[in-house]
Every structure is written in structure tokens, then in C-alpha cells.
Amino acid sequence: MNRTLVILVLVFLALSAGAGFAAESGPQAGAVEAAAASAAPLKVDTGDTGWLLACSALVLLMTPGLALFYGGMVRRKNVLGTVMHSFVAMGIITVQWVLFGYSLSFGPDVWHFIGNLDWIGLRGVGLEPNGDYGATVPHQAFMIFQMMFAIITPALISGAIAERFKFSTYVVFMTLWAFLVYDPLAHWVWGTGGWLKELGALDFAGGLVVHISSGVSALACALVVGKRKGYGVDLMAPHNLMFTILGACLLWFGWFGFNAGSAIASGALATSAFVVTHIATGAAAMSWMFTEWIHRGKPTALGAASGAVAGLVAITPASGFVGPLSSLVIGLIGGAVCYMAVSLKPKFGYDDSLDVVGVHAVGGTLGALLTGLFASKLVNPAGADGLFFGNPGQLGIQALSVVCAWVYSFAVSFILLKILDKVMGLRVTEEDESVGLDLSQHGEAGYTL
């Protein structure tokens, strides 16, 4: 098992070294630079660049925010292991994105499915704008902004497997998942030539690419890995709700970069996305809280925090295409529907530890479909009108994109998990699970009391 992990790490390092060499000395690098020099350069706008870099930092902050949000919801013996799931993504996905991920996601198109490797190791990704991905910001600014999306997405999956997944297998799963699921889906939706983009699917900031992909993959994880020891019998209450609420606040704060930054400029569209993001989030937090209050008799802090995240998820695909009143409706629907989805989890019998499926898979799906209802070219002329603005076909396009994202993400994740289970094993032993992942996987404790 350890030998397998060492071999996989050595293979990854060998590929990394080759990619780095190719980026520095490959014959195509000079050709790309020469072609860029001969073309009329686009002008970098310092305001737009400053805005995008600030948004990149905000989106990165969301991953530590997620670590706190998830970390507070697990039992004390697993807090460090849960936080590590998010923290390690900031290192692993950064390396993967620089060497291969960005080129596969946004590089020159191959059969409308994936980017080629022309930009491997960021070869040809310089400080001049690339017109396809922002006419007023350096290409590297767009690249680093998109890197932050790639970082948080696999970290979201970890909530479904908390308290029982082997850390070594998680590292390998996250790396391979980025190659096999995130990069192709990002190209389909956002890459120049991607087939869903060419079809007209609207996903402003990641409803399909981030939330459906992670939420549906989380469902595959929960089904393949199985339930926690004692699930449904032992008390598994959150050990520190203050962590969770603080994490939700950081997510809310960072999400302004997530959505408003996707305008790739500091103008009117960024303002609109910023405004509707906040409105939907506030509405969803209250919608979840009041729905829970009616259903269970008491409003909980965890419910309000979860509702806020559900609203952030639901508005994400629509944030650059809808106005304030539409965002209010999206938030109200999102909070209530995601609460009901989470409440139904015990009836379906799967152990999604931290409600990734109910919030991200359901919330992302709902947001993508509601975009097909409420999108308006009055908000974004580069988008499309939805059903309520005279274009019923857009709802069909959104529905097709949702089905494709669901099927692809689930199928690839399920197969990948089955292979890793045979090769490395997915779960810790029962003894290690009883001791807790902090000690059994990392040899240290989250708290010294």
C-alpha cells in the first residue's frame, strides 16, 4: 500500500520534471512567443488587473474558510484530518494546475472536449492579455484566478467522506480527479471551443464546473466508501459550531471574488454579480432557517450557516445573468430546497458526512436550471434570455448541461474510486476510525487540552 503510493508520487514527479523542462526549453515556446510578439498587443488595464488579482486572493481564502466550515462539523478527534483535506488541496492542485491543469482546461481546443498541452508548464501564458480570456488583464492573472476555482472544488468533495477516508488515498484521488473530471468539465463550459459553451450553456462562475461536479462526485464517494462506524447510532454532533459559523462567514466574504471576479473586469457586470450574490445569500440563509424552524421547531445556527452556503451555490451560475429581484427568488428557493434535500438524506440511507450532496449537487443543479428561467440580456448582453424573458430554449440547454455534468462526474468518480479501492484501499481500519483521523493519519491532535 505504501509502496503503491510512493510509486504514484514518483511517477507524478517525473511527469512534473518533464513538463517543467518542456516549458523552459521546448521548441514550441519560442514559436508561441514569436507569434505573440507579431500580433497587435492588447492593452492591460491596471484597474481590471488589480480587481482580478484581489478576487483571486478572495477565492483562495474560501478554501481555508471551507476548512473551518467542515472542521467544526466533525467530531473533535477528526478536526485536524478534516482541515488537512482542504489545506493540502492548495498545494497539490497548484502544482497540477501549473504543469497540466490550466492547459487541459483552457488550452487550444481538441475535439471540443479538452484543451491540448500547448500551455503545459504555463508555456506561452505570459503577461500580455489573451483575448479569449480577458482583453484587459494579463493572461497569467486569468490563469491564477481560475487556479483558485480548481483548488476549492476537490476540497468540497472531502465533506462527504470525512472521518473515515485514508489520507494517502485522498491525495491520489484528488490529483487524478482534477485531471479526469475538473479539467475536462471546465473546458466544456468555459474553454474556447468547449462543446457546452458552443451549445450556449450559461454558467457564470461554476454551478456546473464547481458545484455539480463536486457534489455529484461526493455522492459517488459516499456510496462507494460506505457509512461511518456507528452512523445512525452514535452521537456525531458538530464539535465546534463557532468554527463552522466563522468558516461560513469567510466563504460568504470570499464568494464575492468567486462571482464578481468572473466578470474579469471591474465594471458594471462585476457590480451586478456582487450585488446579486449578497442578496441571494441573505435570502437563502433566512429561507433555510425559517423552513427548519417550521419543520423542527427551532432555528439553528448550523442551519443558518448552511443556508447561506446554499444560497451562494445557487446564485453562482446565475450571478452574471440575473438582476436583484431574480436573485432574491433564487435565494429563497435555494435555501428551502437544499434544506429539504439534506433532511431527506437519512431516507436514502447514504452517509454524506457534511451535506455536500444536499448543498452543492442540489444547489448547483437548482441554480443552473433557474438560470434558464431568470437570465436576461439586459443584465449581460453576452449571455442569453431565459424562459421568463422569452427564450424557453435556454432552459432546455441548461437542463442538458446539468444532465451531462451529473452523468460524467458521477461515472468517472465512481470508476476511479473502485480502482483506488482495489489498489490502495479507501477506508481507514475500524481501529483507526475509532481513534480518530487526527492521530491515526497524521500522528497529532487538533487540540492539546
Image (cartoon, rainbow, N blue to C red):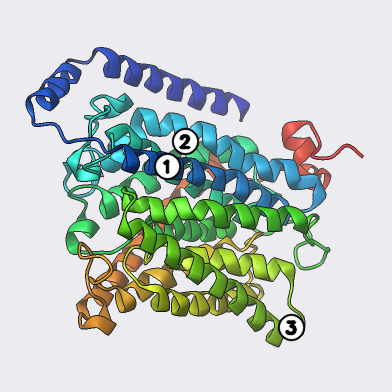
Establish if 189 lies above or below 7: below
Q: CA distance from mark 2 to mark 3?
A: 40 Å
Q: 53 or 399: nearer the eye?
A: 53
Is residue 102 found left or right of 361 in the rendered image?
left
Q: Is residue 252 left or right of residue 113?
A: right
Height in image: 283 above or below 353? Answer: below
> Residue at point 24% right, 38% down?
107
Mark 1–mark 2 Cα distance, whole angstroms, equals 8 Å
Instruction: Give whichever of discs 2 and 3 has the lower sequence position.
Output: 2
Give the residue displayed 28% in from the left and 69% down from the top.
379
**Can you identify the residue that label 2 sits on?**
93
Residue position for label 3 = 296
> Foreground mark, 3 or 1?
3
Please state which of the two labelled residues, at mark 1 or mark 2, is closer to the viewer.
2
Label 1 close to label 2 by CB (< 8 Å):
yes
Query: On the rendered image, what quadrant is the N terminus found in?
Result: top right
- SS of the residue under disc 3: helix
Q: Rate crowding at label 1 as few (under 14), some (14 to 19) or many (20 or more) other CA atoms within 10 Å.
A: many
Q: Amino acid at mark 3?
A: Arg
